[in-house]
Amino acid sequence: MANFTGTALTCIRSERIVFQKLAFSVTASEILYLTGPNGSGKSSLLRMMAGLMHPVEGHFFWNGERISKVTDSFRGNIYYVGHQNAVKGDLSVRENVQTWAALYDSEMENYSVDYALEAFELDSLANLPARFLSAGQKRRLNLARLNTTGSPLWLLDEPTTSLDEAGSLCLKKLISSHIGKGGMVVMATHETNLTNCKILDLSEFTHDPTKFTR
C-alpha cells in the first residue's frame, strides 16, 4: 500500500520559523487536510512535498524510502496544483487541457480531453479563449488538469478558491473517485466543517503564533 510521510520538518521563511517538528502520514485512499490560519505554512508545506522547497530539518519518505534517494521515481507519483491558476489566456479551454495532457503522454493512452472538460462542466466552452473565462471558470479549468495525470498523490493548495457550489461539487466527485481507486490527496483548506477525515492543524507546530509569515 502506497504511503507518504514526513518527520521532524522545520520551515524557515524570512529568518522566521514558520513551523517546526512537524510530522504527517497519508496512505492509499486517504485525504489529509492541512488547516491553520494564514501564514501557518500550509502552502510552504505543500511546496516542500512537491520538491519546490526544502525543509531546514526533517525528511520526507515515499513507501518507506527517503525521497532524496528516490527523487526521480517520486516525482512521477505526485501532481501539484498551486493556489494560482496556470491557465494560458491565448489558448482555448480545450487547448489548455490538451497541453497539460501532453506533459503526461505516457499515462494518457486512453485519456479523453472531453471527459476532463465534462467533469468540470466546461464542455460548452471548449473552443472559447481562456482569457474570457470568469475567475470561477478559470479555477475549474485549472483543476481539470487533474484528469490528465495518473499520479497517485495529488497536492492541492486551496483548490476551492473562486469555486461556486457547483464547481466545488465537481471537485469533490473527482477527489472521491481518485481516492476510491487508491489515490491520495493532501489539500490545504480553510474549511471548518471537516469530519471523519485526517486533519493536520499547522498552528500546532508554529514556533511563534504572533509572527506568522507567508
Image (cartoon, rainbow, N blue to C red):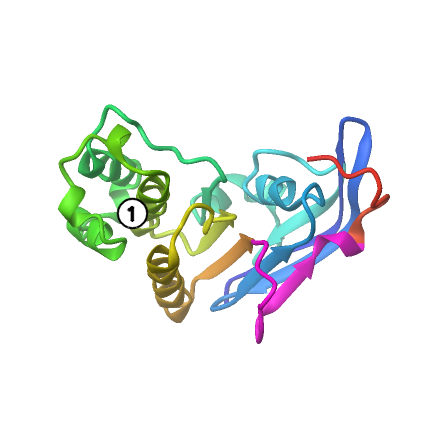
Measured as percent of width and height from the top left, residue 6 is found at 67, 53
What residue is at 64 percent from the left and 55 percent from the top? 35
The number of callouts visible is 1
Q: From this viewpoint, is residue 4 visible?
A: no
- Left or right placement of residue 135 versus residue 89 in this view: right
Measured as percent of width and height from the top left, residue 25 is found at 63, 61
Measured as percent of width and height from the top left, residue 198 is found at 61, 67
Amino acid type at mark 1? Thr
The magenta-colored residue range is 189-204
What residue is at 18 percent from the left and 47 percent from the top? 113
Q: Residues within 10 Å of mark 1 (few under 14, many from 20)?
A: many
| Above or below, comparing residue 131 to residue 6 in the picture | above
Residue hosting label 1: 148
Measured as percent of width and height from the top left, residue 33 is found at 58, 59
Q: Quadrant of the C terminus?
A: top right
For numbered disc 1, what is the local secondary structure?
Answer: helix
Instruction: Return the residue nearer the eye: 89 or 19.
Output: 89
- Left or right placement of residue 46 versus residue 213 in this view: left
199 in magenta: yes
Q: Residue furthest bottom?
A: 196
What residue is at 41 percent from the left and 36 percent from the top? 85
| Above or below, comparing residue 195 to residue 46 in the picture | below
Instruction: Return the residue nearer the eye: 75 or 181.
Output: 181
Q: Quadrant of residue 47?
A: top right
Q: Residue furthest top?
A: 90
| Above or below, comparing residue 133 to residue 79 in the picture | above
What residue is at 51 percent from the left and 63 percent from the top? 2
| Above or below, comparing residue 26 to residue 11 in the picture | below
Q: From this viewpoint, is residue 196 visible?
A: yes
Q: Quadrant of residue 100?
A: top left
196 in magenta: yes
